[in-house]
Amino acid sequence: MLDLAVPMPEDPLVHCREDCRSWPVTRLLSAVLCSGNAAEALLSRFGSLDVIADAGSADLVAIPGIGRRRATQVLAAFELSRRASAPRTEQNLIIRTAKDAVQVVGPVLGDLKREMFVTLLLTTRHRLLKFETVSVGSLNASIVHPREVFRPAIQAAAASMLLAHNHPSGDPEPSEDDVEMTHRLVRTGEMLGIEVVDHVIIGAAGSYLSFRERGLI
């Protein structure tokens, strides 16, 4: 097993007893990609982890030395990180108001550079059953399909749900697409017997908009 105390740009194997929490970003990326040169190419092109995290597959593949396999490794690593940081459901976590929902989804959605649409699945007593990611990217009424929104709710036997997504612009005011999409999901919920209790849009600096509080649903 190779020792990473000496830089090994093309073969950064990890000793099983070594604590990687103190590693610099380049070394972490080298371990993910099994290539120091590829890690350096990524950082040279994008500059920081935040920008890399927002890159799409095509952006990554276009970098010499990355290719489809390494692009997939990078995307998978960021997706694992995102899932690990998602709120954990707890027996005593109750969602009754938009403010309650913001405390759960705000830390996840607040700093994203792309739109993410999520749902909070609730019991009859408003206890959080599950935090579900539905879509990542530009949202509109055609992309966020009721089937994808309600399938997890049906599987979890949820009594109701709260919708949430972010506006990377920082302005939480709803667009026409936001309103159309919400009304469509509310109607679907009525047919399925799963109430859509609210839709919360997360903006910058802790700002948010509640469709219910605004009287939009």
Image (cartoon, rainbow, N blue to C red):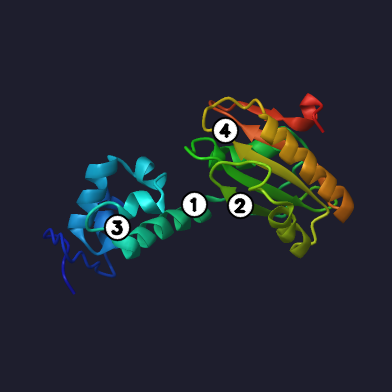
Q: Marks 2 and 3, Cα distance to the nearest angstrom?
A: 29 Å
Nearer to us: label 3 or label 1:
1
SS at circle 4: loop
Checking the image for residue 167, the label placed there is: 4
Q: Marks 2 and 4, Cα distance to the nearest angstrom?
A: 16 Å
The percent coordinates of residue 78 (x first, y second) are 42, 53
Q: Is residue 15 visible?
A: yes
The residue under label 2 is 133
Q: Marks 4 and 1, Cα distance to the nearest angstrom?
A: 18 Å
Relative to 73, is 22 on the left or the right?
left
Specify the amino acid type for callout 2. Answer: Thr
What residue appears at the point 49 percent right and 36 percent down from the top-left corner? 111
Nearer to us: label 2 or label 3:
2
The residue under label 3 is 20
Relative to residue 114, is residue 194 depicted above or below?
below
Q: Marks 1 and 2, Cα distance to the nearest angstrom?
A: 10 Å
The percent coordinates of residue 67 (x first, y second) are 29, 61
Contact (Cβ within 8 Å) of mark 1 with mark 2: yes
Specify the amino acid type for callout 1. Answer: Arg
Q: Mark 3 or 4 closer to N-term? A: 3
Nearer to us: label 1 or label 2:
2
Specify the amino acid type for callout 3. Answer: Cys
Position of the N terminus by quadrant: bottom left
Q: Is residue 24 visible?
A: no
